[in-house]
Image (cartoon, rainbow, N blue to C red):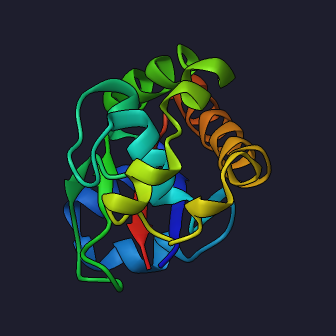
Amino acid sequence: MVLIGRRLSGPELTAAAADPTTVAPLLHGDDPLLDLDKSWHGLHYLLTGTAWDTDDGAGAAILGGEPIGDDVGYGPPRLLTPDAVRAVADGLDAVDDATLRARFDPAAMTAEGIYPAIWHDGDDEFDTYLWPNFVALRRFYRTAATQGEGVLLAVT
């Protein structure tokens, strides 16, 4: 299971909202694409403290948005409006290395069943896997927010 995301321009966002059959081709189309690989669930846990719950701001970065279109592997894609994208971007901008590192608890993540089951490697997984993917996620949302774009996310 990997998380992919695509920034959507105004016309793409309008097309997706009007016709959900356009969602899958948009998601798998040209750049700009976000690929968090399997780090998505670990990042979601670090941002929310839960395996599946979301909240406003940074907590919606991975599993937030409104379901739209057909199942693409692990449920339908989710669509975030430009307003939601700005809220996520602002929330992610407020999170730093020390904050995420303090939330990184390999034993708790393993007990919660956070995918993938690699957390026993400890700090190395944070430094070489979670943190670089968090930086990519933050950059993705900040760029989308600056451009006034929507975001389409899917776990495939």
Count of numbered tags: 0
Query: Is 139 placed left or right of 64 in the picture?
Result: right
Depth check: 146 or 106 in front?
Answer: 106
Q: Is residue 13 above or below residue 4?
A: above
Residue 35, horizontal then vertical, whole percent? 63, 63
Residue 99, horizontal then vertical, whole percent? 55, 20
Depth check: 103 or 12 in front?
Answer: 103
Query: Is 2 placed left or right of 12 in the picture?
Result: right
Depth check: 147 or 80 in front?
Answer: 80
In which quadrant of the rendered view does residue 110 lie? bottom left
Residue at position x 56%, y 29% in the image = 100
Residue 124, horizontal then vertical, whole percent? 77, 51
- The quadrant the C terminus occupies is bottom left
Residue at the outermost top position: 94
Residue at position x 70%, y 54% in the image = 125
In which quadrant of the rendered view does residue 121 lie? bottom right
Q: Is residue 99 above or below residue 124?
A: above
Residue 151, horizontal then vertical, whole percent? 44, 48
Q: Is residue 97 above or below residue 24?
A: above
Residue 55 visible in the current orientation: yes
Query: Is 74 placed left or right of 139 in the picture?
Result: left
Residue 147 visible in the current orientation: no
Residue at position x 51%, y 72% in the image = 117
